Amino acid sequence: MQGGMKETKIVTKDLTLYYGEKMALNFVSIEIPENQVTAFIGPSGCGKSTFLRTLNRMNDLIPSVRIEGKVLIDGLDIYDRKVDVVNLRKKIGMVFQKSNPFAKSVFDNIAYGPRINGIRDKKRLEEIVVTSLQRAAIWDEVKDRMNHSALGLSGGQQQRLCIARSLAVNPEIILMDEPASALDPISTGKIEELIFALKENFTIVIVTHNMQQAARVSDHTAFFYLGELIEYGKTRKIFTTPDHKQTEEYITGRFG
Amino acid sequence: MSRRNNITGAVVVGASAFSAIAIIAIIIVILVVIVIGGKDRMTWEFITAFPENGMTEGGIFPAIYGTALMVIIMSVAAVPFGTITALYLTEYTSEKSIFAQTIRFAVRTLATVPSIIFGLFGLGFFIKFVGGEMDSVFLGGQLKWGQPNILWASLTMSLLTLPVVIVSVEEAIRTVPRELLEASLALGATKWQTIRKVVIPGSISGILTGTILAISRGAGEVAPILFTGAAYYLATLPTSLSDQFMNLGYHIYIMSTQSADVDGTMPIQFATTLVLLLLTFLLNFIAILIRARIRRKAIV
């Protein structure tokens, strides 16, 4: 690897994705480093969210999607026939654009993942729930309302709860699809701080519309346009001296 | 122009108000006629005693009991079956697949089949075919299941109410946000775990709505049970699934058409109708209570 880069966690090779006949991703090849934050930026419809969702095979849910090329995580092809997609997703947490807590208590939301993994011991569950909430920096706000509905929390709290929920299954990678786009600046700040703290233990990939956010939280940035990966490199370089004209135009706000 | 619009508006408002009032009036007239006609016979004895003296005296307890029991067996059959079908249609097939469209077409068709056809189907399929085969295989031809009974009547009724259950459960499942399914799957839950822990709890009130509608429909229908299990008169309550049963709707029918003294038993007919209405309301009310309770639990 190049100087300063950590181990590579995720590799895609000529990843191409079709929605029916329409090509949505066009030969995307990228190497995403471990324990760093990688941001995907680009205008709406450029394929960045679609690409993110190929990394934990969430696109499998859409019948018309067809995928060519390879996605390797820790060197393993995740689209290989032998791969159990359920086990794969246990390794990869996902945080969505719209916070989506279950209509259950705070405790049951966090315990959802551990429970489906067969953890029944009450003490052990409590331990996981508390640790996950602490790691997501929301423990202090919810510790007195563990048995209340998660739907009673504010938008920002719900989103951090969803992050805590994904941490509870102990993933290695966390995918975030515009996690702060529906939040106010203060909640956004909290999420960004959290991302910064989490990268010590997790490989984080974040899709964002907000270029300042990409610049603030990420180590590497990938710019997508019309289904193609136009440019990928260290965030500082992308935001100061991009190689491609399109990248420059986008980050300076000339289109998008 | 604007004057014309005003007139049109007034006509529309008038017509819709009239229709609304007409509907209320019809319901009130029905209820008042039934209550007035039956109130004198509505005694504790009437709802707890057996019919006496060729059903011109006594009570209608066996018919109440039989109706309630049939509705319960019907729900036990129709609700899980309908829920599973709805789950299959929403979660396991693509909407456009030929198979899914065939199922949907079948469900719609089933909903329009006249209820007497269900009765004939029940007679042919459950009694003659299933029951008859059961008798010849397990009982060496001795007649037990190959004749009308409460099980076959309830199953026949469950076929009639199945479309209602399927449609309301399907609608409820569609209101469960897709984001929640994705959240569950992204946590490494299998599809079945997701259905069990997210989809079904999220659509439980729709499942209960389907149950309510099915009960209301099933409690009042007579045609499907005419040949499949309802009895004119029984001296004992059904104690086994292979027993026949008395039924309120059927009781009203025979009292008003087959009775020796139709005019003389008029108060009994009205009172029986009143009981049938009250029973339907009561069953509905219980289901609504359960639904409200589940909803409250989900939100708090």
Image (spheres, grey):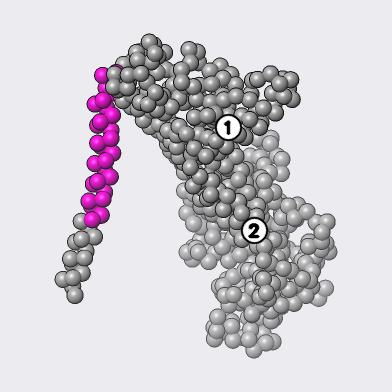
In the rendered image, residue A172, in percent from the top left (x then y), is placed at 73, 57
Q: Is residue B232 left or right of residue A19?
A: left
Task: Say if B226 sits above or below B3 in the image.
Answer: above
Which residue is the site of mark 2?
A: B98
Which of B182 and A188 lies nearest the eye of the viewer?
Answer: B182
Which of B295 and A244 lies nearest the eye of the viewer?
Answer: B295
Q: Chain ID for label 2?
A: B
Please say whether residue B260 is one of the residues in the magenta stretch: no
Q: Is residue B220 left or right of residue B189?
A: left
Q: Quadrant of residue B153?
A: top right
Q: Which residues are magenta?
A: B15-41
| Residue under the point 32% across and 19% down | B261
Q: Chain ID for label 1?
A: B
Task: Say if B145 sits above or below A176 in the image.
Answer: above
Tell which tag, 1 or 2, sits nearer the viewer: 1
- Quadrant housing the C terminus of chain A: bottom right
Q: How many marks?
A: 2
| Residue under the point 56% across and 19% down | B243
Which residue is the site of mark 1?
A: B123
Mark 2 element type: helix
Specify which label sits upstream in the sequence, 1 or 2: 2
Q: Is residue B18 left or right of residue A162?
A: left
Please say whether residue B21 is one of the residues in the magenta stretch: yes
